[in-house]
Amino acid sequence: MIVANGMPMSWSVMGGVAMALAVGLGAFGAHALRKRVDAEALRLWETASRYHFVHALGLFVIDFLVSSESADAHSLLPVAGWLLVAGIVLFSGSLYTMTLVKRRWLGPLTPLGGLAWIGAWVCVAIAAYGSSVA
């Protein structure tokens, strides 16, 4: 459970927001950027958008597991959720920004986002394994 402005919010709410952004940014890239950037930049945008979608869906997985698993498995699930969010910001965000402003110095942020995603999925695996052996 996430708390924002004193109000509880589920990972599904965060996932819904992330998915809405992924759809909007994907559409922006497909329509507004197609004639404004070169093919390489457009590939970066499409990669950012694809990975953004996949990991936004992962937030729904986190919410499902939090609501269905034993309390023992919950400790890693919020960590996994925040790592998914960090990955979206670092990986997809750096690629979106590099496409728009052509600043290659942002490139080192991209693999950090990938590492955040790897960490998130490892946390999910550990939590799921812990609940299956409990």
Image (spheres, rainbow, N blue to C red):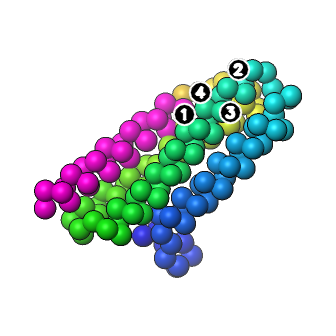
Q: Residues within 10 Å of mark 2 (few under 14, many from 20)?
A: few
Question: Is disc 3 placed on a helix, strand or loop?
Answer: helix
- Give x and y (percent) for residue 112: 47, 35
Q: Residue 107 carries which label?
A: 4
Instruction: Indicate whether 125 appears above or below 48.
Output: below
Disc 3/disc 4 C-alpha distance (Å): 13 Å
Per the image, the residue denoted by label 1 is 109
Q: Which range is magenta?
A: 109-134
Q: Which of 123 and 128 is in front in this view?
A: 128
Quarter of the figure with the N terminus: bottom left
Dividing the picture into quarters, in which one does residue 36 lie?
top right
Q: Nearer the viewer, residue 74 or 46?
A: 46
What predominant SS class does the magenta segment belong to?
helix
Disc 2/disc 3 C-alpha distance (Å): 9 Å
Q: How crowded is mark 1: few (under 14 residues within 10 Å), some or many (20 or more)?
A: some
Dots 3, 1 in contact, CB < 8 A:
no
Dots 4, 1 in contact, CB < 8 A:
yes
